[in-house]
Image: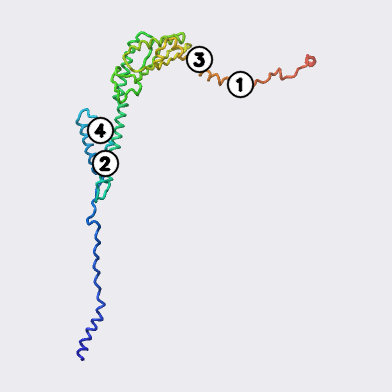
Amino acid sequence: MAEQLLTGAPEAGAAQKAPDAPAAPPAPSPAPPQPGGKPRKVRRVGTFTMGLVLVAAGLVLLAVLFVPGFDATAALKCAPLVLVSLGGEVLAAAFTARDERLKYDFLSMVVCFLLIVTAAGASVCVLMARYFGPLPMQRQEDIEAEWESEAYERLAGGDVAELAATLDPSWQTADSEADALADLTQSDLLYVSVRLDGRYADEEAFARACREVMDALASIDTKARLSYRFVNEADAPEPLYTLYADSPYLQDRSARELARSVETREYGEAAGGERSPDEAQEVSQPAADASQSAPEPTASASEEAPPVDASSVAGSAQPAA
């Protein structure tokens, strides 16, 4: 009995100390199963279009460098096809993607946008160079010089002191690239300025001289429309005449009828310079206003002084004598 008590005492003590041992960590819970089984694939939209655009741009550059006469302007006009390709790729991805997640390629879209802007800018630069570059300006000067040369040949020995021709800037259109005077059409306009060195008695005499010049220049082989401006080189006191014949209707009129369209400007005698009737009226108007606003002259001394008695004057003069 005593042995059992002695042997049981340690077991009881061990049983009391057992709760003080550290507890084991809990086992991790299993991950919940994902729906669908496998993760969705990511499909990038825009990559195909960017690759296609880069290939096309490289081919165009090669053609410009190695193909003589290649029209780069036509290739630049195809730049909107980049938007068409990008939109087609987006639609195709939206209809064909089933278990795929669409992700738009921002870098590809930025590159496509920059290519479109560059193509548009290059098209504008090509168009500006076509109308305002050195080549069209040189062709315009050649055409003007050709017309002036033929005009001087037909007017040799006349009253023409100076003649100048200027081709309207809109002469070069997308459908017309004239290289010579004979290539101009009826849609082209040529401004002609003529200065006559004769002395003319009246408007009809000046119009008669203008009529002779237009008749001589009508034989020049060109289909372009002409707009004439005639002036005379006059000295005081001769008047200065000006005639504008800028339509076929005026250019077909007789000298007497043209005289009605002649503008006359007189030279001022006092100022010694050229003045038109309107300018003379503007000069005389301030003088008239000044004369109206000037104060009235004061009365003279004889009107303001009182009358003097003659007898008093005589009486005052006797003591002095």
Q: Which of marks 1 and 3 is nearer the N terminus?
A: 3
Q: Which quadrant of the rendered structure holds the N terminus?
A: bottom left
Amino acid type, residue under disc 4 in the picture: Ala
Real-space CA distance between mark 2 and mark 3, rounded to the nearest whole angstrom: 78 Å
Going by the numbered disc 1, the residue's amino acid type is Gln
Looking at the image, tell me whether mark 3 or mark 4 is earlier in sequence order: 4
Write down the residue under mark 1. Answer: 292
Distance CA(mark 2)–CA(mark 4): 21 Å
For the residue pair 255 and 143, the one nearer the viewer reads as 255
Query: Which residue is depicted at the point 22% across and 41% down?
Result: 51
In the rendered structure, find residue 75 and report the number of the disc placed on it. 4
- Residue 268, label in figure: 3
Q: What element carries label 2?
A: helix
- Residue 16 lies, with reference to residue 160, above or below; the image says below
State how far apart marks 2 and 1 are (Cα).
Answer: 84 Å
| Residue 182, position as x, y percentages in the image | 29, 17
Q: Where is residue 234 in the image (x, y as percent from the top left)?
A: 44, 12
Q: How far apart are marks 3 and 4 (CA)?
A: 65 Å
Residue 318 higher or lower than 174, as above or below:
above
- On the picture, is 315 further left or further right than 31? right
Instruction: Please state which of the two labelled residues, at mark 3 or mark 4, is closer to the viewer.
Output: 4
At 20% across and 30% down in the image, what residue appears?
A: 67
